[in-house]
Amino acid sequence: MVVHFGPCRIELIQGDITQQEVDVIVNAANSKLAGGGGVDGAIHQAAGPTLMQETRMLYPDGCPTGSAVATTAGRLNAKYVFHAVGPIWAGGERNEKKLLASAYSTCLDLAREHRCDSIAFPAISTGVYAYPIDLAAEVSLTTTRDLINQHKTPTLVRFVLFGPGPYGAFARVLEVLAE
Ligand code: APR
């Protein structure tokens, strides 16, 4: 599914984010940037060991929840990996919505700073961190829509959803935003 917002577009696809050819691949990391399972494990495995070496060297103190940091992308077909740290879902009363929005907006800010025109996101926080997928779709897509409307870049924002459930949740929200 593709929806245009002025010169920019939001694309939804089902697939594996490590296979994308874009300027930036976003990782759903933890605040220690220590690696892990899920999309984090897949990205480190596909990118190779230089990703962790660079992350440790540049960001020994990790990255706060709701923010993101940039490294090069190793063997991935991308210029950069942005390691974004989403919130752990704790019922919705612990600032999770603001922190998730801020993880996305930091990545979109970094993309502009690095002059990157295409970026692929996973559904940050919706796996191990248990953020409900419908609520995550709402926050992720409205934050993205608002920022691309404001800055007119990056021109391609692709959400790579892992399976039909997450894809359906994102598609329902994007359909409403397209109206
Ligand atoms: N491509 C795209 N999406 C993927 C992939 C992949 N290869 N693998 C998993 N996903 C999806 C999951 O299905 C989920 O919808 O990414 C989403 C985010 O799930 P997680 O990877 O578990 O990330 P998150 O919920 O943000 O939890 C972060 O998990 O592995 C650890 O180090 C990571 O501690 C951190 C935590």
Image: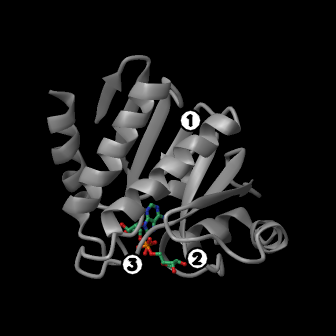
Q: Mark 3 and ligand 1: say if the CB distance to the nearest ligand atom is below 8 Å.
A: yes
Compute the Cα span from label 2 to label 1. Answer: 25 Å
Sequence-first tag of 2 and 1: 2
Give the residue type at disc 3: Ile
Instruction: Identify the residue at horizontal 75%, vertical 72% (top origin).
Output: 52
State ligand 1's quadrant. bottom left
Q: Nearer the viewer, mark 3 or mark 1?
A: 3
Q: Secondary structure at mark 3?
A: loop
Give the residue type at disc 1: Ser
Sequence-first tag of 2 and 3: 2
Where is residue 67? Give x, y as percent: 55, 61
The residue that mark 1 highlights is 118
Where is residue 125? Give x, y as percent: 39, 69
Check the image and report above or below for 39 versus 61: above
Q: Secondary structure at mark 1?
A: strand
Give the residue type at disc 2: Ser
Q: Nearer the viewer, mark 2 or mark 1?
A: 2
Where is residue 9? Give x, y as percent: 40, 28
Instruction: Identify the residue at horizontal 70%, vertical 63% (top origin).
Output: 47
The residue that mark 3 highlights is 88
Asked which quadrant contains residue 133, the reply is bottom left
Asked which quadrant contains residue 163, the reply is bottom left
Q: Quadrant of the N terminus?
A: top left
Where is residue 8? Give x, y as percent: 43, 24
State if disc 1 and disc 3 touch (CB < 8 Å). no
Compute the Cα span from label 2 to label 3. Answer: 11 Å
> Is residue 179 rendered to the left or right of residue 2?
left
Check the image and report above or below for 47 versus 153: below
Sequence-first tag of 3 and 1: 3
